């Protein structure tokens, strides 16, 4: 619990039917679907079933992320991947600053989509901001939990969930971060709509992702069926279709883009 943080906690809901959940120390239960979601090492797991089926995209993606989790936040991984992407000015710290700046006016609750090791959740949480990190990789989340404990950080709440079915009610978040992952989701508009569903009208979404370009990283990524290389106009079109407005972006090198958008007030 975030001492001194008066922000109201957001309860999890069933990712399928959005019904409220009954909890005991070991699990959360949906009476409507009659589903039980276990709590593993203090992390509610909303995708246990899907993630056990080896043929699902979630299983394959989570496995890759699990493997990466132990060295993901090491300076070598972040530095190397940004260098290969020809991003000269970006670093973990500069991206954290970008997200902090986008969300600076928020007093309330922030969702960190595909949070990995709670990379940015940990750096954004404060006495005026609770951050809810979701990811499909238990390896990433457990590593994140260990960093949170080591750093005595409060106000970060992790759960294992897929961005396609978020375990949160409509219009509960004051802001959202989606860093390093938008290009990984098979259906961008569907995901953006699901993220938007959980946001209050006018709330900001802060994103870092990759755009198509002729770099080593892009050439490598192009060969991977699980990565999408956006064109700028296509990205803008997806955001508009999903109900976002006020697209403000900036490039660092040819393929790294950071941007902020707002959930349209009329959606
Ligand atoms: C490159 S990491 C980014 C982690 C963190 N946001 C950061 O920028 O450091 C991509 C993350 O996306 C997660 N991911 C991929 N597909 C997902 C999905 N459908 N739902 C939730 N998380 C997903 C992976 O498990 C992985 O942790």
Image (cartoon, rainbow, N blue to C red):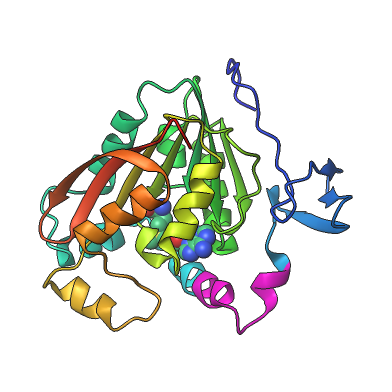
Which secondary structure class fits the magenta region best?
helix
* Residue ID at (81%, 43%): 21
Would residue 72 be visible to someone looking at this image? Answer: no
Q: In the displayed structure, does residue 246 sit left or right of residue 3?
A: left
Q: Of residues 193 and 38, which is closer to you in this image?
A: 193
* Residue ID at (40%, 63%): 71
Is residue 174 positioned above or below 81 on the image? above
Is residue 250 positioned above or below 50 on the image? above
Report the label total. Answer: 0
Q: In the displayed structure, does residue 53 sit left or right of residue 32?
A: left
Is residue 143 covered in magenta?
A: no
Is residue 39 positioned above or below 138 on the image? above
Q: Of residues 178 and 67, which is closer to you in this image?
A: 178
Instruction: Where is residue 178? Give x, y as percent.
Output: 40, 49
Magenta-drawn segment:
49-63
Q: On the rendering, which quadrant does ligand 1 occupy?
A: bottom left
Q: In the displayed structure, does residue 234 sit left or right of residue 25?
A: left
**On the image, which quarter does residue 47 sit in?**
bottom right
**On the image, which quarter does residue 49 sit in?**
bottom right
Instruction: Where is residue 256? Give x, y as percent.
Output: 20, 56
Instruction: Where is residue 115? Give x, y as percent.
Output: 47, 51
Is residue 56 covered in magenta?
A: yes
């Amino acid at each position: 619990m975030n001492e001194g943080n008066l922000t109201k906690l957001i309860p999890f809901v069933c990712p399928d039917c959005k019904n409220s959940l009954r909890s005991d120390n070991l699990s959360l239960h949906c009476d409507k679907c009659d589903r039980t979601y276990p709590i593993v090492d203090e992390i509610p797991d909303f995708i246990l079933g899907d993630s056990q089926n080896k043929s699902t995209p979630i299983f394959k993606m989570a496995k890759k992320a699990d493997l990466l989790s132990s060295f993901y936040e090491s300076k070598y991984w972040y530095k190397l991947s940004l260098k290969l992407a020809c991003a000269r000015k970006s670093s973990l710290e500069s991206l954290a600053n970008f997200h902090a700046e986008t969300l600076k006016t928020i007093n309330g609750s922030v969702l960190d989509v595909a949070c990995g090791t709670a990379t940015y959740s940990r750096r954004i949480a404060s006495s005026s901001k609770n951050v809810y990190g979701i990811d499909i990789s238990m390896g990433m989340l457990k590593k994140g939990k260990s960093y949170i404990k080591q750093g005595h950080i409060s106000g970060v709440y992790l759960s294992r969930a897929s961005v396609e079915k978020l375990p949160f009610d409509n219009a509960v978040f004051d802001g959202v971060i989606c860093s390093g992952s938008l290009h990984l989701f098979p259906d961008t508009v569907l995901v953006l709509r699901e993220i938007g569903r959980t946001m209050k009208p006018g709330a900001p979404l802060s994103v870092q992702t990759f755009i198509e370009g002729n770099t080593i990283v892009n050439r490598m990524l192009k060969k991977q069926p699980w990565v999408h290389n956006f064109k700028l106009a296509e990205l803008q079109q997806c955001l508009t279709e999903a109900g976002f407005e006020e697209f403000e972006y900036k490039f660092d090198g040819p393929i790294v883009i950071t941007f902020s958008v707002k959930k349209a007030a009329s959606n």
